[in-house]
Image (spheres, helix red, strand yellow):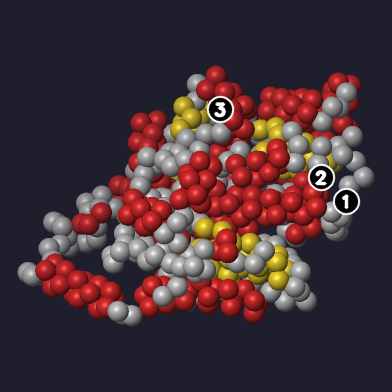
Amino acid sequence: MDGMIIPPETGSGCHGGRETMIEAARAAGKSESLDQLMKDYPRGPHDQPQSMCPAFGSLRVGLRMRRTATILSGSACCVYGLTFTSHFYGAKRTVGYVPFNSETLVRGQLYEDIRNAVYETAKPADYDTVVVINLCVPTASGVPLDRLPKVIDGVRIIGIDVPGFGVPTHAEAKDVLAGAMLRYARLEAEAGPVLRPRTQAELPTVTLIGELFPVDPVGVGALLAPMGLAVGPQVPSREWRDLYGALDCAVVGAVHPFYTASIREMLAAGRPVVGSGPVGIEGTDAWLSAIGKAANVTADKIDASKAKFLPAIRAALEANPISARITVSGYEGSELLVARLLMEAGATVPYVGTACPKTEWSDPDRIWLEAHGTHVQYRASLEQDVAAMKDVKPDLALGTTPLVQEAKSLGIPALYFTNMVSARPLFGPAGAGALAAIVAAQTKGKERFGRMVSFFDGVGKGATAGYGWKEIPKDPPGSKERYRKAREAKAKASSAVGT
């Protein structure tokens, strides 16, 4: 029956555990969706994502597109956190929300409420596309977004499941929506004429996959010009019609190699795909050769681009040398590229950890790094990153917030990868000199970090942090039992709703 929903068992909400949620989702008819997610984004060693809620990635892609409405279906606490994070990162767009409770979930009313919200939102004067995102509980309950209309008054409707128990990182969740959009656009283009992008290059184009620093596409375009190529619209795209331009390319550059669904659609459109990116001298040399070969560019044009830009990159690296021992970790997907650039600038990088999975499109960077003595850890957990940092004892640690916190507590200079490293160019001459200054500034502060650790010595850590605590604080007698009974009573009252 349309809208039939099987709710997960009581107590198996957002924090019910990955296996419990997966079992509930399969029982509710979501096996096909889950199987595809697990094939595209194989799980790592940890039970749940260790970064922010993965659905933020899909939400971010939708909010960055013109004339695109985004509606969330999930627990109120999750929606609050996602909208807060999206606005923290600069989104100035409304996020739709379809609330639910035990009764509307059990009776299947949630699907009808989502459907009504979609019809109310799909106004062609306002939007080209409406995106609906199922979070954990609606996915586990089998809310069937695939039964929504595909189009309403010319407005496209795209429903996707992005549960934390099926998508390991927010970086991969970007691909969930980007891939779904590319598929829809590809089928539209195959069916007949479509709108041109607002700006269209006269030369054959290269589509870059991955969220890049704004200067990088411009720099890549300069590298490609002597080869008779130009940069086309990126994926994720900023407007629906740009998806047609992205598909209509000569070759795809999988700069972020974990966009499995997007790459699948490009291959289905008959487009060749090249991994890695133009970082440093060796990286740029190899990438230009691979792109040129895939686009059938003649050898003399490829050599002309190299002759023009490789000396400039070499000069930038020599003018901005890095002499430091560095560990690199993060969940953005560009960690291997950053490590290559650091090493070409003179740094020693014994360890690179990325929360993203190993794919064939990351092989060029992995092979290069391993040949230069770097251990590459895919699907790296926080525990693995911290253990590597403690073993290496670097001059600088680049990583996630908890890793940076741990590093500083040990007196090791550290930088948050997402805000401080991803917010700089990587490619061409601009990228070659972009990291030296921040590395130098941070490594000079190592002695200061040592003084800080010494100053705070003896105040405790973890549960005993702060003045006055010698032992872990003890709970008042009987408090755990009272809290347990209160939770059970609340769960019992919740399960009684609608019966």
Task: Specify the farthest residue to the left.
Answer: 477
Q: Is residue 265 visible in the rendered structure shown here?
A: yes
Residue picked out by circle 2:
248
The mark lying in front, picked from 3 and 2, is 2
Residue 467 against residue 458 in the figure, above or below: below
Q: Nearer the viewer, residue 161 or 465?
A: 161
- Mark 2 falls on what kind of element? loop
- Give the class, few, some or many, for how many residues have Cα within 10 Å of label 1's Cα (few <14, many ≥20): some
Question: What amino acid is labelled 3 in the image?
Answer: Arg
- Mark 1 falls on what kind of element? loop
The mark lying in front, picked from 2 and 1, is 2
Q: Is residue 415 visible in the rendered structure shown here?
A: no
Residue appearing at x 40%, y 30% in the figure: 392
Residue 402 against residue 39 in the figure, above or below: below
Task: Specify the farthest residue to the front.
Answer: 1
Can you give x and y, in whole percent of width and height, for residue 452 in the image?
35, 50
Q: Nearer the viewer, residue 91 or 242?
A: 242
Please indicate whether residue 345 sits to the left or right of residue 459 in the image: right
Residue picked out by circle 3:
366
- Give the class, few, some or many, for how many residues have Cα within 10 Å of label 3's Cα (few <14, many ≥20): many
- Mark 3 falls on what kind of element? helix
Question: What amino acid is labelled 1 in the image?
Answer: Gln
Q: Nearer the viewer, residue 13 or 424?
A: 13
Q: Residue 200's mark?
A: 1
Measure the C-alpha gap from mark 3 to mark 1: 34 Å
Question: What amino acid is labelled 2 in the image?
Answer: Asp
